[in-house]
Image (spheres, helix red, strand yellow):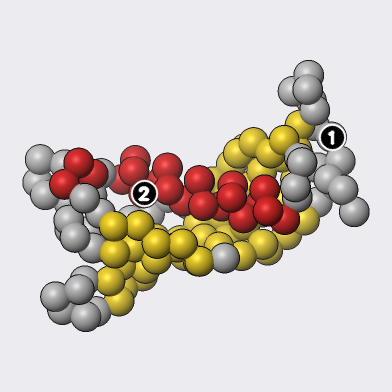
Amino acid sequence: MENHKLVMPEHLNHFGYLFGGYLLNWVDEYAWISASLDYPGCNLVTIGMDTVEFRKTVKGGTILKFITEKVKEGNTSVKYFVNVFGSNIEEGNKDLIFSTNVTFVRINEEGRKTPLPR
């Protein structure tokens, strides 16, 4: 799945670069959307995000592209790999900004793990 996000002034820190927390939020959100589309009707919650390493700074006006793909399915959990690329409209360059795995687990109404549908 592919999603895009425009980095706006409200996403920037006092140095003029993207706050990392916004990027982590978007990665989690877009991975969750992918998982929810793959497993409709399931209650999925984030249980883990692998390595968090920001490879490049991101300025305001950058268009971020999020590419999400399922990489592993377990009994109660599923893992998605997310790559984030930044496109600078003025310069036309596309750089890998961030990548990580996001793992979700399916829970029931009591908050306990429950098997994914097959």
Q: Residues within 10 Å of mark 2 (few under 14, many from 20)?
A: many
Say whether residue 104 is left or right of residue 115: left
Q: Position of residue 107 (x, y in %)?
A: 76, 31
Instruction: List the residue tagged with mark 2.
Output: 23
Q: Residue furthest left?
A: 15
Residue 80 drawn at (x, y percent):
62, 57
Q: Residue furthest bottom?
A: 92
For the residue pair 65 and 17, the one nearer the viewer reads as 65
Residue shown at 17% from the left, 56% from the top: 60
Q: Give the amino acid type for the residue marked by disc 2 in the picture.
A: Leu
Q: Are marks 1 and 2 in contact (CB under 8 Å)?
A: no
How far from the left and from the top, in percent, is residue 69? 61, 65
Q: Residue at x 11, y 49 (%)?
A: 16
Marks 1 and 2, the one that precedes in the sequence: 2
Question: Element type at marker 2?
Answer: helix
Q: Quadrant of residue 99?
A: bottom left
Residue 94 figure quarter:
bottom left
The residue indicated by pointer 1 is 114
Asked whether residue 50 appears in the rendered view, the answer is no
Figure quadrant of the N terminus:
bottom right
Q: Secondary structure at mark 1?
A: loop
Q: Residues within 10 Å of mark 1 (few under 14, many from 20)?
A: some
Instruction: Determine which of the numbered discs, if any, sits on residue 20 in the image.
Output: none
Q: Which residue extends farthest top?
A: 110
Q: Is residue 87 above or below residue 8?
A: below
Q: Residue at x 50, y 46 (%)?
A: 29
Q: Quadrant of the C terminus?
A: bottom right
